[in-house]
Amino acid sequence: MTEPEELQDGDLCVVIAGTHTGRSGMVADIKSSKTGAVTITVVQDDGERFKTLARNASRLSAGGMSKA
């Protein structure tokens, strides 16, 4: 199994597993817990935010969205 691409702030991503499967948006925040789990906050086009595990998301484009 290959390592997933590392997500960065500003990347456009889509959630491929878990509760938010199928939702997409811009990565706005990346946190790492004491146990090593990496969580991201994703902001959708309509402004709605949700958190998910980074391993459940796949990058669509790197830093492709600008903040208006």
Image (cartoon, helix red, strand yellow):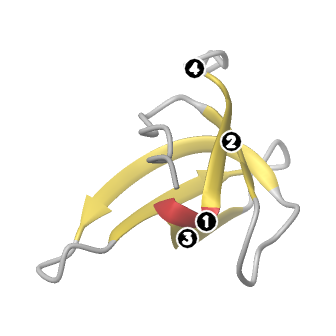
Q: Is residue 31 left or right of residue 57?
A: left
Closest to the observer, 6 or 65: 6
Residue indicated by mark 2: 13
Q: Position of residue 5 (x, y in %)?
A: 49, 38
Mark 3 nearby-residue class (10 Å; few <14, some 14–19, many ≥20)? some
**Could you tell me residue 17's position as x and y percent?**
73, 72
| Residue bearing the label numbered 4 | 62
Q: Earlier in the sequence, mark 4 or mark 3?
A: 3
Q: Amino acid at mark 3?
A: Lys
Q: CA distance from mark 1 to mark 2?
A: 10 Å
Q: Secondary structure at mark 3?
A: strand
Q: Earlier in the sequence, mark 1 or mark 2?
A: 2
Alpha carbons under labels 4 and 3: distance apart: 19 Å
Residue 4: image x %, image y %? 50, 46
Residue 23, position as x, y percentages in the image: 83, 60
Question: What kind of element bears circle 2?
Answer: strand
Q: Nearer the viewer, mark 1 or mark 2?
A: 1
Mark toward the viewer: 1 or 4? 1
